[in-house]
Structure formats: structure tokens, C-alpha cells
Amino acid sequence: MSGLPEDIATQVRQLAEQLHDVLGKQMAGADPAPEAQLLWQAAKLVNTAAGGLDYATGSPADQRFSRWWDVADIGSDIAGTAMQIAAQGLTVEHAAAQAESFGALDAGFTTTIGTATVRLYPKDEESTQTLTVTVDADPLHPLTVTADHGAAPTPRPYTSASLLRVDQAMRRLGQALGGVVDHQDDDTA
């Protein structure tokens, strides 16, 4: 179900297991290094992509979807960890400058500034709250959060790591939306 010939999938799973073994001591500590966490996640991704996890319940289509959803989810975790590592030692101002200069390389995506609406579902569902989050890579403009009812949360300062993670997520969103918009060109070709 991984799309790989079984002998290759088996070898890939063995390599992922070896990587887990190598990282075992690092991950057993109270606070493993982000680099070790990233490699651990990469081994999980490789193992999952090679069909190493058991998805025995549901139809074959459901099993396939669950496997590749997990691969995407692990990939997101890897991206978040990589941004945490990239932000080490950076000030918020430097991280913003890095995000802007990296953004200049993208093909027309301006994704360092954006607004998202988030609906919170606390344990008491009667008190759901919709938050509007505005993110600006310019460190002079803080991350702001406004609420639809009750007291608006106080804007909280963000870190270099959180800024880079949000920027990376916004870039991915921009790419996905660009793909949706650009698909009309496929229809005319």
C-alpha cells in the first residue's frame, strides 16, 4: 500500500528503525535537542511512507488516506521543528528580515502578512469564541488577537520561532491557494 516494491519498502523501514535506534538515547532525555526531535520525526515519516504502520481498520481507501494524512501531519511537525531550529539565536527583528528576504525569492507570494479567523472550542462548548489573528512580519507591529465576545485577549509578544513558523505556514497556504487559482489555466490548455 506504500507504492514501493515490498523488498524496497522493507529496506526503507529497516533504515528508519536504525535511525530510531541511533536516536533512542537522545530522545529518552527530559529535553531532547530539536535536531534529534527532527530526525526522530523524519524516521517516523519514512517508516509511515514505507508502509511500516498498521492501518488494518477501515476500507483500503480509508487505510491509504489515513497513512498519507499521517505522513503530511508528520511533515508539518518536521517543518515546525526546522523553523524552531532556524530561529535559534535570532532576534525577532532578524527573523522578520530573514522571512522577508526569503519571501522575496518566492514567485509573487506576499505571505508574511495575513489575517486568520480561529474558532476556539473550550470544554464548555456554549462559550465558543471566535478570534481574529493578525500577523505582521514587521516587528514594530505585534501579533494582535481580537475576540468576538468578552474581553479581547491582550496581544502577546511572539518569538522568532513562532514568527518563522507562521510565515512558513502562510507561504504554504499561499502556494495552495495559488494552485487553486492557477488551475483554470489547466482547463484552457
Image (spheres, rainbow, N blue to C red):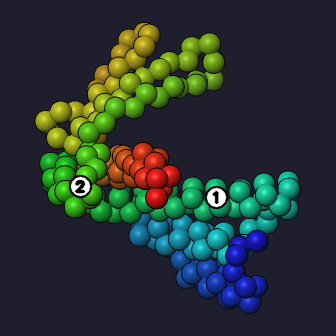
Is 161 drawn above or below residue 42 in the view shown? above
Helix, strand or loop at disc 1? helix
Q: In this rendering, which labeled residue sits more in front, label 2 or label 1?
A: 2
- Is disc 1 surrounded by few (<14), some (14 to 19) or many (20+) residues within 10 Å? some
* Residue at numbered disc 1: 70
Could one spot residue 127 in this view of the protein? yes
Q: Quick one: 20 or 105, which is closer to the camera?
A: 105
In terms of depth relative to the viewer, which is nearer, 80 or 57?
57
Q: Is residue 120 above or below residue 126?
A: below
Q: Quadrant of residue 16?
A: bottom right
Q: Residue at x 31, y 48 (%)?
A: 167
What kind of residue is marked 2?
Answer: Gly
**Residue 29 seen:** no
Query: Distance of mark 2 from mark 1, alpha carbons?
Result: 28 Å
The extreme front residue here reads 188
Q: Is residue 55 left or right of residue 38?
A: right
Instruction: Name the element at disc 2.
Output: helix
Q: Position of residue 172 (x, y in %)?
A: 40, 52
Is the residue marked by circle 2 packed among few (<14), some (14-19), or many (20+) residues within 10 Å?
some
Q: Residue at x 46, y 53 (%)?
A: 188
Rendered location of residue 140, percent (x, y): 13, 36
Left or right position of 183 against 100: right
The residue singled out by tag 2 in the image is: 103
Residue 41: where, in percent of width, then height? 54, 67
- Can you give x and y, in whole percent of width and height, for residue 55 in the image? 79, 62
Locate residue 157: give its quadrant: top left
